Amino acid sequence: MLRRLRRLLRRPAIPTLNSQDAYANWAASYPPQAHNVLMRTEEAAMRSLLPDLRARIVLDLACGTGRYGLLAQEQGAALVVGLDNSAAMLAAGALQHTALATLEALPLPGNAIDVILCGLALGHLPRIGPALAEMGRVLRPGGLALVSDFHPVMAFSGGQRTFVAPNGRTYAVEHYPHLYADYHRAGGEAGLQIVDVIERGVEGAPSPAPAIIVIAFQR
């Protein structure tokens, strides 16, 4: 343990960008597919909890270039809406029905959405309560929200989401760890009940610690 801490302390610091600046720089090289081992691990977990999307209205929340929205279309969703706070990511994406919006203020009526898919996004927020409140507002009764994120164990161990910008430099994206208790409390306040949880490590990683967490909420 001490040797690991010494290695962490010796690492050169990677500059951290806020999510807006990070995705503005990342958008040009961010495909609408899982493009690294962490995302492939996360997507496999999300798919394992995915409900039947046929004829459903699906919100790809924090859609980026539209990875989960495209998946919903492939699964037969009646309508897919993508919302993201990065104009650059939306411009680089492939979804037809998109809008610029923050997680805390969704430009949608209440009781309008059957399924929300939100991948690797809530960790960009210092507080998840307002975002979950908005999910609870726009979901129809019985609707499902699948939320994935970087696992807090990985974050507390020094793990970061990084990317290489067009200038050739490596940056980390801002991240705020949220515990299961945080999701449970904020979800309950939003009228959302946790119905399933997956914590999964990256296959072949040197540490068996979980790298991602996926939580299924039902209204």
Image (tube, rainbow, N blue to C red):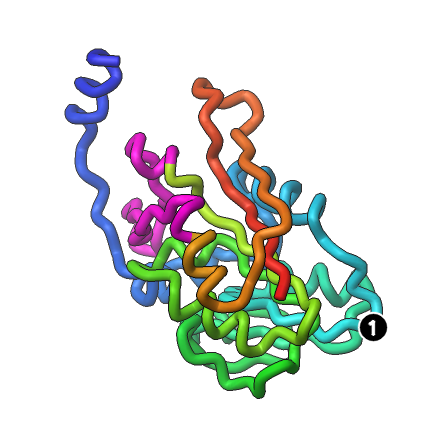
Residue under the point 36% across and 66% down:
24
119 and 165: which is toward the camera: 119
Looking at the picture, does residue 217 appear above or below residue 131? above
Question: Relative to 199, is 1 on the left or the right?
Answer: left
User: Is 33 on the left or on the right of 27, as rendered?
Assistant: right
Q: Position of residue 183 (x, y in %)?
A: 44, 53
Q: Residue at x 57, y 87 (%)?
A: 109
Residue 128 appears in which quarter of the rendering? Answer: bottom left
Answer above or below: position of 6 versus 111.
above
In the rendering, at what x and y percent does residue 114 appear? Answer: 70, 71
Which residue is at 83% across, 67% downward?
A: 54
Q: Which residue is denoted by mark 1 in the rendering?
A: 55
Q: Amino acid at mark 1?
A: Ala
Tell me which segment is drawn in magenta: 153-182
The x, y position of residue 134, in whole percent, is 48, 74
Q: Quadrant of the N terminus?
A: top left
Q: Is residue 25 magenta?
A: no
Q: Is residue 157 magenta?
A: yes
Front residue (pair 45, 166): 45
Residue ID at (17%, 18%)? 6
Quarter of the figure that contains the C terminus? bottom right
For the residue pair 42 and 151, the one nearer the viewer reads as: 151
Q: Position of residue 143 (x, y in %)?
A: 68, 68
Q: Label 1 neighbourhood size at 10 Å, few (<14), some (14-19), many (20+)? A: few
Does dot 1 land on a helix, a strand or a loop? loop
User: Residue 32, located in which quarter of the rendered image?
Assistant: bottom right
Q: Is residue 74 left or right of residue 176?
A: right
Position of residue 180 relative to residue 82, above or below, is above
